[in-house]
Amino acid sequence: MSLSKKSKKRIIIALVAIAAVLVGGYFYLYQSHQSINDMEVAFKGNSQEFLTKIEANADEWTTGGNKVVELTGVISGKDLKGVTVNGSIYFQLEEGTKTDALKEGQKINIKGRIIGYDEILEELKLDKAIILKK
């Protein structure tokens, strides 16, 4: 049983189309992540001032994603993956960043992307954080 020329063309076109969709889907799903350094800063300043803005209108800052802030404050706690600034702002540091050299009570300038605000605990959470100045 042999296929006609017309059937062979249809099969080849279908296979090429499927391959194109798979390759396009792969590149769409696994596109490179944007670096925090390349993202536009939506707020730059003191962490206490920013907490006042968040408490007034958390939805404005937490919806839409990819809002980056650069804050200055005092480290009030730390763990292996991040630091807490002024008791209410938790920065999850970029992977590979060590917190060994950081000390509680130390002033810090840090940049991160807002991922959420917990109104019950009154805690702002950020990720992809990078330390600008210690």
Image (cartoon, helix red, strand yellow):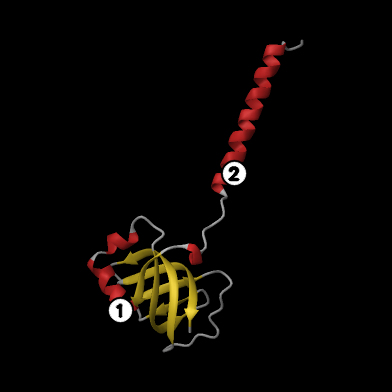
- Work out which quarter of the rendered image holds the N terminus and state it: top right
Q: Where in the figure is residue 102, as x and y percent of width and height?
A: 50, 85
Q: Amino acid at mark 1?
A: Gln
Number of labels in the image equals 2
Q: How many other residues sit within 10 Å of disc 2, few (<14), some (14-19) or many (≥20)? A: few
Q: How many other residues sit within 10 Å of disc 1, few (<14), some (14-19) or many (≥20)? A: some
Of 65 and 119, the residue lying toward us: 65
Mark 1 secondary-structure assignment: helix
Q: Please indicate whether residue 19 sits to the left or right of residue 70 in the image.
A: right
Q: Amino acid at mark 2?
A: Tyr
Of 17 and 1, the residue lying toward us: 17
Of 72 and 4, the residue lying toward us: 72
Mark 2 secondary-structure assignment: helix
Asked if marks 1 and 2 touch (Cβ < 8 Å), the reply is: no
Q: Residue at x 46, y 81 (%)?
A: 78
Q: Residue at x 50, y 67 (%)?
A: 37
**Disc number for residue 61:** none
Reading the image, the residue beneath label 2 is 26
Reading the image, the residue beneath label 1 is 48
Seen in the picture, residue 25 relative to 112 is either above or below; the reply is above
Q: Please indicate whether residue 45 sits to the left or right of residue 37 in the image.
A: left
